[in-house]
Image (spheres, rainbow, N blue to C red):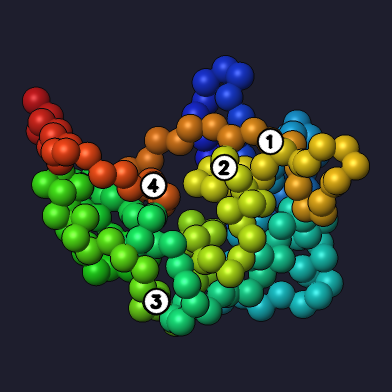
């Protein structure tokens, strides 16, 4: 189980669990203990196949579990990764996605910029939110508007136009070593490389 977000007073966060049968009772207790506005997200366990009854139990805790239940096809569809979304390691190594090993260049010397373009994913499937959230055929940029990295659903639309699956949870900033969705903007010079410690 894990929490995404910063522990500062007044900031919003999300909390996540892996959807395995052994975790269900603890996940139910966690949902009961959390404030209603905190999104409890359930990641489908890698390699686990869910019956409809099992999926219904997890969906009762996370109405968005259906997006995670089955892996998404990687190769072929349009992805934002590698074009407007990149993953950056602590040393500045840029990859199109946290799950794709091929390097695009380095953030600090700007060498990644020439490699930015739309392209199909080289992986057969994607089964993690920080990857498939960037699949253009899914509506997840709308579902998580303002909270894509943090796995925080957008606030519901105004009364009279409610949509299923949205909860009230404003977005928060997130600090991480590997960033799943920094939107790349051009600058005149590359970012300075951080000084080594000590």
Identify the residue at horizontal 39%, vertical 47% (top origin). 183
* Residue 41 image offset from top left, x and y in percent: 66, 51
**Which of these two is toward me, 197 or 64?**
64
Q: Which residue does the numbered mark 1 point to in the structure image?
A: 169
Q: Is residue 33 above or below residue 184?
A: above
**Which of these two is toward me, 101 or 26?**
101
Dot placed on the residue nearer the N-terminal end, 1 or 4:
1
How far apart in space, not on screen, are marks 4 and 3 (Cα)? 18 Å
Which SS class for mark 2?
Answer: loop
Q: Is residue 103 left or right of residue 82?
A: left
Which SS class for mark 1?
Answer: loop
Residue 120, label in figure = 3
Q: Are marks 1 and 2 in contact (CB under 8 Å)?
A: yes
How far apart in space, not on screen, are marks 1 and 4 (Cα)? 22 Å
Q: Which residue does the numbered mark 4 point to in the structure image?
A: 183
Q: Which residue does the numbered mark 2 point to in the structure image?
A: 147
How far apart in space, not on screen, are marks 1 and 2 (Cα)? 9 Å
Question: Splitting the image into 4 quarters, where does residue 86 fall?
Answer: bottom left
């Amino acid at each position: 189980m894990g929490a995404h977000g910063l522990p500062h007073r007044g900031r919003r966060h999300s909390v996540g669990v892996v959807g395995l049968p052994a975790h269900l009772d603890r996940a139910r207790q966690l949902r009961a203990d959390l404030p209603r506005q905190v999104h409890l997200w359930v990641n489908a366990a890698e390699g686990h196949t869910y019956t409809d009854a099992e999926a219904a139990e997890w969906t009762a805790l996370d109405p968005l579990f259906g997006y995670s239940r089955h892996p998404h096809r990687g190769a072929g569809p349009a992805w934002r990764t590698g074009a407007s979304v990149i993953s950056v390691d602590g040393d500045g190594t840029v990859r199109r996605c946290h799950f794709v090993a091929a390097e695009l260049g380095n953030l600090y010397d700007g060498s990644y910029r020439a490699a930015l373009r739309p392209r199909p994913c080289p992986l057969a499937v994607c089964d993690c939110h920080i990857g498939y959230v960037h699949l253009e055929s899914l509506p997840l940029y709308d579902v998580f508007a303002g909270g894509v990295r943090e796995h925080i659903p957008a606030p519901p639309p105004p009364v009279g136009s409610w949509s299923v699956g949205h909860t009230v949870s404003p977005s928060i900033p997130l600090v991480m070593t590997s960033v799943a969705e920094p939107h790349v903007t051009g600058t005149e010079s590359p970012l300075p490389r951080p000084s080594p410690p000590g």
